[in-house]
């Protein structure tokens, strides 16, 4: 005989078919989740538990801190620049004044960076020293003339000349100026020589002026008597 579901006793939800209430274990059936509110951790009161804050800085204190940091950065940068080295040109041997420089006269070395703006830079070929320079001394821009070989060639000589005060262009000549030396002859022939000023004009007690001038070697030797005479005038050439 077949048993239908209508003939079975009601054992409740989740119980096996055909089982009676007495046959089931005490924990049989669906488990019911405990109340969610009962297991939820209590919300922490962060406002009450927040650690105390430090004292607030006023506007003046903030400016003071910024000023201190800025001062420290400036000191640090100054220390770094003080110790920084830059490449320079150093002479290999003692050089006299008005020596025609070439790369054989110098070697590359380093010096402190604070004098960087005063150091001479390449190229130096064709420039003359304006004063004696000692061995291992770094070349400075003020120690060198402009390049004279483009105007006079590589065979040059420097000589001193004396000119009338009015003929010295009112003392406006400077090192590197290109000039034309005019020597009026006893005849109508006028001699003119190209030159480059090596030193500023120096006034003499007799109303004349003297200066050092670079000339072509051959011309200086050929016209030494005219150069040593006091009959000379200067014209400034367009550089």
Image: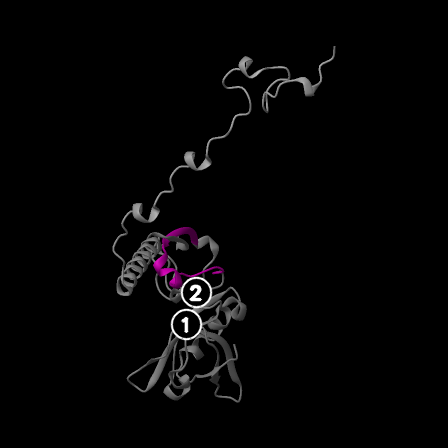
Q: Position of residue 194 (x, y in %)?
A: 50, 76
Q: Position of residue 87 (x, y in %)?
A: 42, 53
Q: Which region shows up in magenta?
A: 106-124
Is 148 included in the stretch rendered in magenta? Answer: no
Residue 201 occupies quadrant: bottom left
Q: Compared with residue 32, is residue 9 higher up or lower down, i.e. above or below?
A: above
Is 113 included in the stretch rendered in magenta? Answer: yes
Q: Mark 1: which secondary structure?
A: loop
Left or right of 41? Residue 178 is right
Left or right of 226? Residue 206 is left
For the image shown, how many numbered marks are present on the structure? 2
Q: How is the image coloured?
A: one colour
Q: Residue at x 27, y 49 (%)?
A: 52
Answer yes or no: do the residues labelled 2 and 1 have beta carbons within 8 Å?
yes
Task: Identify the residue under disc 2.
Answer: 128
Q: Position of residue 1 (x, y in %)?
A: 74, 10
Q: Position of residue 239 (x, y in %)?
A: 52, 76
Rendered image: mark on residue 198: 1
Q: Residue at x 47, y 57 (%)?
A: 102
Mark 2 or mark 1, earlier in chain? 2
């Amino acid at each position: 005989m077949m048993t239908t579901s209508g003939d079975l006793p009601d054992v409740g939800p989740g119980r096996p078919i055909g089982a009676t209430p007495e046959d089931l274990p005490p924990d049989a059936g669906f488990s019911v989740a405990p109340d969610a509110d009962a297991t939820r951790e209590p919300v922490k009161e962060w406002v009450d538990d927040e650690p105390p804050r430090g004292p607030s800085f006023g506007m003046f204190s903030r400016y003071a801190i910024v000023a201190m940091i800025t001062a420290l950065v400036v000191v640090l940068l100054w220390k770094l620049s003080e110790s920084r080295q830059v490449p320079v040109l150093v002479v290999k041997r003692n050089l006299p004044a008005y020596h025609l420089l070439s790369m054989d006269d110098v070697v590359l070395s380093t010096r402190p960076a604070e004098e960087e703006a005063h150091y001479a830079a390449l190229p130096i070929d064709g420039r003359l020293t304006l004063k004696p320079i000692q061995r291992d001394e770094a070349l400075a821009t003020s120690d060198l003339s402009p390049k004279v070989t483009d105007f006079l060639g590589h065979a040059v000589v420097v000589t001193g000349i004396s000119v009338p005060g009015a003929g010295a262009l009112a003392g406006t000549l400077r090192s590197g100026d290109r000039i034309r030396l005019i020597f009026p002859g006893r005849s109508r022939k006028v001699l003119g020589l190209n030159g480059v000023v090596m030193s500023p004009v120096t006034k003499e007690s007799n109303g004349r002026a003297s200066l050092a001038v670079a000339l072509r070697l051959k011309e200086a030797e050929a016209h030494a008597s005219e150069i040593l005479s006091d009959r000379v005038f200067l014209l400034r050439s367009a550089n």
